[in-house]
Image: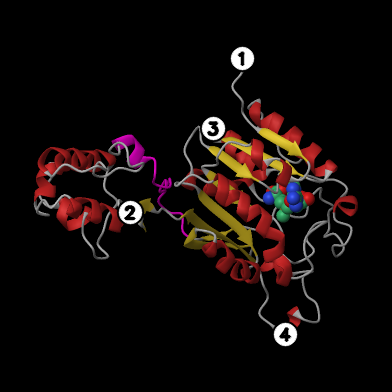
Amino acid sequence: MDEKKYEIFHGNVLEAYQNWPSPDLIISDGAYGVRGFRGDTVDVSSLGEWYLPHLLEWSKKAKPSTSLWFWNTEEGWATMHPLLVSHGWDFVQLAIWDKGLAHVAGNVNGKTIRQLPVVTEVSALYRRRLLLNTEDGRALGAKEWLRYEWERSGIPLCKANEACGVKSAATRKYLTKDWLWYWPPGECVQAMAEYCRTNGPASDRPYFSLDGRSPVTAAEWDGLRAVWNHRNGITNVWSRPPLADSERFKGTMERSAPRMHRPTRFSCAHLNQKPLDLMSIQVNAASNEGDVVWEPFGGLASASVSSILLGRIPYTAEVDDLFASIAEDRLRDAAKGDDRNGE
Ligand SMILES: C[S@@+](CC[C@H](N)C(=O)[O-])C[C@H]1O[C@@H](n2cnc3c(N)ncnc32)[C@H](O)[C@@H]1O
């Protein structure tokens, strides 16, 4: 049987989350508070209410290592940021899509004429907050937990270097309390667990145990960390114009976004279709091949198309029938290896 390459749900994503596997990466491109699509809010004041049911599902199904790219306007992101943090998502950085001067044309009205022209959208990267349990019922961040577990053994700190087979990296980096802390490789954490087990006092709870029953293995420890694939030359400012070329799907914009301002010089199937190159930066950076990527607010499913092309397995949903059927065609083509565009 063929391996599953993608899944698209035609309907409200709130009915789909429960059937999707836990995500390694979520790419959210939902309400902006700008009446951008049928169902978008009229301003940012109700974004929290709009996103809350989704945020609850993301938080419930996330792994300790799940990352989230959250697209919005700068005001929409600023409005949503406290809610994301309060639901266990740690802010990493903000990426800015600079659409360039051409984007100003046609976007001027009585309000925007009295401010600097806005030519940007933003995408904030968050990671699921990692908290690890201790013997005495507390939940600590990774840095504090590692130090706590070592100290619990009563073994002098300097012996951690011997345990890890390093000159000074364990004391200087892995168990330090200061800002020079580094995430230790799984094999070192496993080695410290074994060292404490054999040289420390017996304990009901194994040292360095995630579940309280067995010591953490190297693979388990490595799996707790969010993916980051560094590529030279890519910064947090992405300068490229909005889609206006053959990648842009043409179609009945009037039907799909009836309340938007009039179309620009061409009609497009979806006003918010994102460029595949930007989606690829996000997918590449924050997931690995074979990972599960959620794109809850599919539109034309650009993040999911990128995910297929990059060997990830996307799960997406789209509530509008027309968008969903275009997205479905796109996904099918991408899965067949046909990197078709909007022509
Ligand atoms: C900003 S657009 C996404 C555009 C997409 N990034 C692309 O490149 O085509 C948001 C989309 O989410 C859809 N949507 C909004 N709420 C939804 C929900 N609860 N379930 C599924 N789709 C939803 C809207 O119909 C709209 O097409």
Mark closest to the chain's N terminus, 1 or 2: 1
Tell me if the residue at label 4 has its CB under 8 Å from ligand 1.
no
- Residue at 35% across, 54% down: 137
Question: Which image quadrant for residue 191?
Answer: top left
Q: How many marks?
A: 4
Q: How far apart are marks 1 and 4 (CA)?
A: 60 Å
Left or right: where 70 falls relative to 284: right
Q: How far apart are marks 4 and 3 (CA)?
A: 46 Å
User: Is 298 located above or below residue 239 in the figure?
Assistant: above
Residue 219 lies in the magenta-colored region: yes
Query: Callout 1, which amino acid?
Result: Met
Contact, CB < 8 Å: mark 1 with mark 3? no
Query: Callout 2, which amino acid?
Result: Ala
Query: Callout 3, which amino acid?
Result: Gly
Left or right: where 114 falls relative to 133: right
- Residue at 42% across, 45% down: 229
Which residue is under mark 3?
311
The answer, for residue 62, to whether it is visible in the render is yes
- Marking on residue 1: 1
User: Is 115 located above or below residue 253 in the figure?
Assistant: below
What range is drawn magenta here?
217-235
Tell me if the residue at label 3 has its CB under 8 Å from ligand 1.
no
Which residue is under mark 4?
114
The residue tagged with tag 2: helix, strand or loop?
A: helix
The residue tagged with tag 1: helix, strand or loop?
A: loop
Mark closest to the chain's N terminus, 1 or 3: 1
Left or right: where 86 falls relative to 300: left
Which residue is under mark 2?
142
Tell us which disc is closer to us: 3 or 2: 2
